[in-house]
Amino acid sequence: MKPLDEIQQRLLREVADLHTVPEGAYNIRANGQSVGRQSTANIEITPKEGVSGLEIRIRPGTKNESVHIPVVMTQSGLTEVVYNDFYIGENADVTIVAGCGIDNCGNQDAQHDGIHRFFVGRGARIRYVEKHYGSGDGAGKRILNPVTEVYQDEDSTVEMEMVQIKGVDDTDRKTLAELKSGARLVVRERLMTHGRQNAVSTYEVHMNGDNSSADVVSRSVARDDSFQRFDAKLVGSAVCTGHTECDSIIMDRGRILAVPGLEANSVDAALVHEAAIGKIAGEQIVKLMTLGLTEQEAEEQIVNGFLK
């Protein structure tokens, strides 16, 4: 693998928990170029033809292996769109770690748009982790617009962890999922915005097969003058169960908009939406202050615990 500078290494630690070259299959991208790639006997990573991106093919029955495909950007003014397709074979059980970190110290915007498509075979199980992080003291923005499409075959399971805690100025996340019979989708989103940041999350899940299920939960904190919008639409067209939840803390002059959407096309579709937006309870702060914390330290403890 080509050497990375200190800032790029820090970004890798933030978005992928990588301190060294990962074991197993990986592709690490820095400033628009692949700086290291490795396939294994069961996981093949190849570049796409005609567009920027990868094809990741995981053999049926692959167990206890991982794929790391993080992106780091330190070049102000760079804008890129990357298309990654994942083909997960029947009865595979793997972890996929993505994520993007942008350090922008310049005056031009830096933007990464990642379009990921997952084709999940019958009985397969994947855990997908996508972390976003921004840093740098330049006037240019750090912009991330991920698109995720998930197509699940029968009896498959997809667990997705979407995290954005710091430094991203604008993000527009779109997630679409289609589930066949017995398929199960679990999404856990954690998000914090501050300053004048904007974050939009849109989820649309179609449960097309009998006994499919979806559970989409977002926990977020909006600080300063930031804005968040959470759209979650569940479409039940068979015997299915769906649950979506938005649980948010609003602080300072932040704004949060939660837009639920439930569409039942079958009498046997059971769909539920929950939403709660509010400030930190005063008694929580007082209780922590009696233990010796300042008011600011108490707020930070509450926010950190909420987002875990």
Image (cartoon, grey):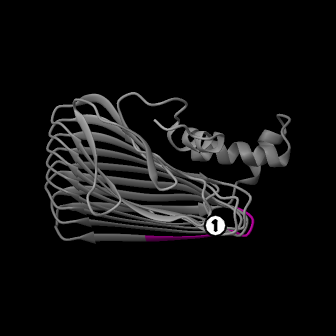
* Horizontal side of residue 82 vs 189, given as left or right: left
Q: Which residue is mark 1?
A: 141
Circle 1 Cα neighbour tier, 10 Å, few/some/many (<14 / 14–19 / ≥20): many
- The quadrant of the picture occupied by the C terminus is top right
Pinpoint residue 262: horizontal percent, then vertical percent: 32, 69
Pinpoint residue 201: horizontal percent, then vertical percent: 46, 65
Q: Could you say whether the residue bearing mark 1 is in a helix, strand or loop?
A: loop
Pinpoint residue 215: horizontal percent, then vertical percent: 35, 52
Residue located at (64% from left, 56% from top): 167
Front-most of residues 196 and 296: 196
Return the residue found at the far front: 2
Residue located at (16% from left, 67% from top): 266
Front-most of residues 308 and 33: 33
Q: Amino acid at mark 1?
A: Lys
On whether residue 129 falls in the magenta region, the answer is no
**Is 73 situated above or below 2?**
below
Q: Magenta residues?
A: 251-259
Front-most of residues 53 and 224: 53
On whether residue 258 falls in the magenta region, the answer is yes
**Is 58 situated above or below 160?**
above
